[in-house]
Image: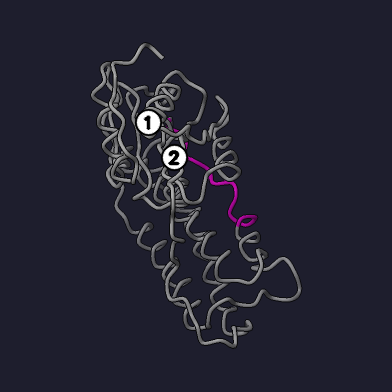
Amino acid sequence: MTDSSDTPSALTASHLVTDHDVAARVARGHNLLRRPVHDRSGVARLVVDVTEWTVHNRELLTKRFTDHAVADAYARATDPFVVPNEGTGVEQQVSLLHRQLRHHIDWLERLRRTIPSRQQPASGHDEPRLSRHARSRRVPAVVATSASPVAAMVMGAVARATGVLPVVVEGAAGERHAVLRAAERALPGDGVAVVVIEPSEIDPAHPSPASLIALGYTAGALGADDVIAVCAPGLVHDAALDDFANVQMDHGDAWRHQLGRLLSQSGYEAAPVVSARRE
């Protein structure tokens, strides 16, 4: 079912605009299915992109229907998103992601078939594209999967660079989806988010799956242009980060300067970085 009630939710835009928007989300899903994935780096990038795609889907359904019944039904039908086990082969990991993608796409295609029968607004003032509200002061946020020493260092660096205490969106160690629940409650809709990329427990040279999910969710909620990834020391570069501004932490202050410059591009007045005490 695409609605939780007997009365289908009406549309906030015309049949044509709504169908165009849902069709675009379906097309994006098929593009993700067709993407060739040959290694674990490709798997990691697919996890980020599927997570971001799902968040955009929910945002669209909330925007294009008069109540939340459709978006809630989509969430019930597609949650939880299962991240492949790092210990399995690449082929098995891709197969799991593709099965979930097909389930999402099938749901959206069923929804699309119901659009012509739904009530559309009488006004002709359609909104062809989702737009962001005008912003005043940007709100910084730090998204981290746990209260680690690395996360604490990033929080301090953001506060110094912006002169503003950031909103902290933090998960719990050992709970993969805890940070997503925290983000749903606390992530500012008009914010700039710094996502802490922590090492995997199985392979410390690579990002943890939970960090990549948090990155994808945050990008889906705010847009990739408003997300900065800060990688813990020692992580090798991962293709999943290529679509984002990213900073590689080191043992000096160079990464703080780089983060400050990126934040200044989002409207903050960069503060001078003094050599930091151990945080």
Bin the neighbour count of mark 2 within 10 Å (Cα to Cα): few under 14, some 14-19, many 20 and up: many
Q: Is residue 268 magenta?
A: no
Q: Compared to 148, does 68 lie above or below?
A: below
Q: Position of residue 194 (x, y in %)?
A: 40, 37
Q: Quadrant of residue 257?
A: top left
What residue sits 40% from the left and 45% below the top?
A: 48
Q: Compared to 153, does 218 lie above or below?
A: below
**Kind of element beneath mark 1:** loop
Bin the neighbour count of mark 1 within 10 Å (Cα to Cα): few under 14, some 14-19, many 20 and up: many
**Kind of element beneath mark 2:** strand
**Magenta span:** 75-86
Q: Which residue is mark 2?
A: 140
Secondary structure of the magenta portion, mostly? loop
Q: Quadrant of residue 204?
A: top left
Nearest the viewer among 229 and 54 is 229
Say what amino acid the circle numbered 1 marks. Answer: Pro
Q: Which residue is mark 1?
A: 207
User: Which of the marked residues, 2 or 1, is nearer the chain's N terminus?
Assistant: 2
Q: Position of residue 203 (x, y in %)?
A: 37, 23
The answer to whether mark 2 and mark 1 are in CB contact below 8 A is: no
Number of on-image labels? 2
Q: Quadrant of residue 89?
A: top left
Q: Is residue 85 magenta?
A: yes
What residue sits 40% from the left and 21% below the top?
A: 153
Colour basis: one colour
Placement of the C terminus among the 4 image quadrants: top left
| Front position among marks 2 and 1 | 2
Say what amino acid the circle numbered 2 marks. Answer: Pro
What residue sits 47% from the left and 51% below the top?
A: 190
* Residue 74, numbered label: none
Side of 240 where 12 appears, left or right: right
What residue sits 43% from the left and 76% below the top?
A: 128
